[in-house]
Amino acid sequence: MTIAERIQQLRDEINEHNYRYYVLSQPVISDFAYDQLMNELIRLEQEHPEYFDPLSPTQRVGSDSDNTFEQVVHAYPMLSLTNTYSKEEIKDFDQRTRKLVPGQQIEYVCELKYDGVSISLIYSNGRLERAITRGDGEKGDDVTANVKTIRSIPLILKGKDYPDYFIIRGEIFLTHDGFNKMNREREEVGEPLFANPRNAAAGTLKLLNSSEVAKRPLDCYLYYLIGENLPFETHYDNLMKSKEWGFRVPPYIKKCNSLEEIFAFIDYWDVERDNLPFDIDGVVIKVNSYRQQRIMGFTAKSPRWATSFKFKTEQALTRLISIDYQVGRTGAITPVANLQPVQLKGTTVKRASLHNADQIALLDIRLNDMVYVEKGGEIIPKVVGVAHEYRPAGSKPVEYITHCPECGSELIRNEGEAKHYCPNENGCPPQIKGKLEHFVSRKAMDIGLAEATIEQLYNHGLLKNAADFYSLTKEKLVNLERFADKSAENLIKSIEASKKVPYDRVLYALGIRFVGETVAKKLAQAFQTIDKLAGASLEELTATEEIGEKIAASIKQFFNDDKNKLLIERLRSAGVRMQYEPSVSNKISDILAGKNFVISGTFRHHSRDEIKNLIEKHGGRNQSAVSGNTHYIIAGDDMGPAKREKALKMNIPIIPEDEFLKMIQSGMFM
Ligand code: IVH
């Protein structure tokens, strides 16, 4: 088998596994076996850039270069649907339909109305050509780079009997689990939370950095085909056929031949929607026959052959008794309503989120008001409005707290942020405990400790900050409740093992505001020791990929704080890693040993991270900016003219991507 054939075979095989996993939810191989196939393909593609394909399954990880979105005119405008709110209105819709296609049998197709972001996918010769957002309906943004990261969207179609050119539309959304996971991660680093799964999906799709998109659990359901050469004359049959081409078509679909059947579908899903793992806001009813659809046509805004039935969001009305203010691990304050217990969708609701001071003011929520409560995809229900007619006389607007309920510090509110914060990072109990929990978490130092145990150790004065973990001894632990010989020993072992955790995860573990996993990795690459990072100027920080002013300021603030300096010294003397150590096991060669590289621009065959990894795997070092000891610049297509001029002046060789790849392949580097 030639290399080209093996690459093709691996791509086909991986595409098939993606399809089985993401579309059918029926994986047939282990994650490990999948990773092995993927690793082989990555290696072959790296070694043979001549076989690069932007639609290879390796390209689903996205690129870390900034995308900008080109505006594209839709070949067929993206219209909206008329809304109905009652069965009466559905009856009217049915009558209008029957008038427009008199004397004919009419078959409807009922589907769910997915509450996400609509997307239009263009396929040409079986390959994803473009993905465009709805925009204003006439033209939208080309978000192909981001959409490619969604594993359930096929990049290359299966089979052979698809039309040469067609459009398929659907909804990109987040499941409740995906949404909650994302918000938990944002809370951890102090990023503002998304209000609901739809906002989160929309925000993600518009991210400029597709490798960030790749990390978010976006999903997609497809529900509408457009094209000149579709195989069947009905919506339903084409949709079913498109499953064979690899598309994820939702199973919640039914052909209905009467109003009764439509109503049964609506009634069923009005109840069952609570058990779906994602949000829907109604049901869509479409005329199945394309011939009839053509006769009915469109108004300026929507098709006449379809309508949506919107579900009422269930609300409960109850009295607001008091407001608690919770202090999160980042110091963010969340006002929480204590309510007169009320039944909502089968559970008793006693507490609900009030979000922030602005929301309270906007809804003019007052103590003792009767308030409406709703439950969405979020974990806690939320207060969405006030029944003003029940307002008791003499009530006054809520006076938002000015001081932390846990430690008494005066609260601050940064410009452009919705939440108030307690600034007493190192002295406010929930913040201290939150930092400790973050420090031990799996993606950070991975020390096996439950939240309750942290609380216990904190209450006994054994833990005040992260460095105290390394002063714990078995003797100190065994006397505590819940600790036996074995569990104490295990904890000490786990703490000991954390000293081997790589530097970038240590940076993440420190819990610097806005420094999540990815940013920590970038920082560790650019500033290879913690001292260099601590000493970096704002300019040096912002010169690093992905580090903007907000993150840079937060890093400076962290390292300027004497308490943090002391913490780092204590961690360092305990043996925690404070510098980057290239992992020996990944090493491919030493041909770049002793050489310093700066990479610039975007690359055709690899992401910037991949080029950097290649440099390191061959023994070289990456630098964040050109300096006197830079040996080479690896230049992408769009290297800036200023940089180019500077490099020429400094006599630093500029190597294009292809040449660089050839050089490391041949093992010959000057
Ligand atoms: S069909 C010509 N089917 O609802 C309209 N739309 O208000 C073709 N939506 O922009 C759309 N679920 O984002 C269709 N099963 C479904 C849908 C659906 C959700 C959204 C879609 C569209 C909006 C229309």
Image (cartoon, rainbow, N blue to C red):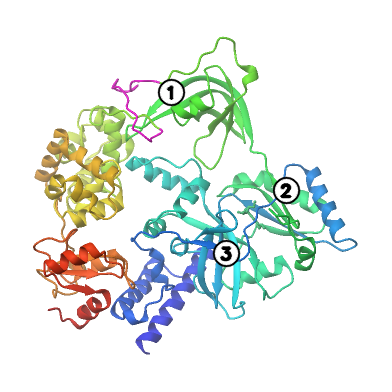
Binning the other alpha carbons within 10 Å of mark 2 as few (below 14), some (14 to 19) or many (20 upward) gives many
Q: Secondary structure at mark 2?
A: helix
Left or right of residue 575, residue 208 in this image:
right
CA gap, disc 3 and disc 1: 44 Å
Q: Which residues are magenta?
A: 401-418
Q: Amino acid at mark 2?
A: Ile
Q: Amino acid at mark 3?
A: Arg
Left or right of residue 313, residue 12 in this image:
left
Q: Secondary structure at mark 1?
A: strand
Q: Residue furthest right?
A: 103
Q: Reply yes or no: does residue 405 show up in magenta.
A: yes
Q: Residue furthest top?
A: 394
Q: Secondary structure at mark 3?
A: loop
Residue 268 screen position, x and y as percent: 71, 48
- Identify the mark at residue 116; answer none if there is no mark: none
Q: Quadrant of ligand 1?
A: bottom right
Binning the other alpha carbons within 10 Å of mark 1 as few (below 14), some (14 to 19) or many (20 upward) gives some
For mark 1, what is the residue?
324
Binning the other alpha carbons within 10 Å of mark 3 as few (below 14), some (14 to 19) or many (20 upward) gives many
By secondary structure, the bulk of the magenta-drawn segment is best described as loop
Mark closer to the chain start, 2 or 1? 2
Q: Residue furthest bottom?
A: 1
- Identify the mark at residue 248; answer none if there is no mark: 3
Residue appearing at x 51%, y 64% in the figure? 131
Q: Nearer the viewer, residue 5 or 303?
A: 303
CA gap, disc 2 and disc 1: 39 Å
Determine if residue 408 is in view.
yes
Above/below status of 47 relative to 174: below
Q: Nearer the viewer, residue 374 or 286?
A: 286
For mark 2, what is the residue?
266
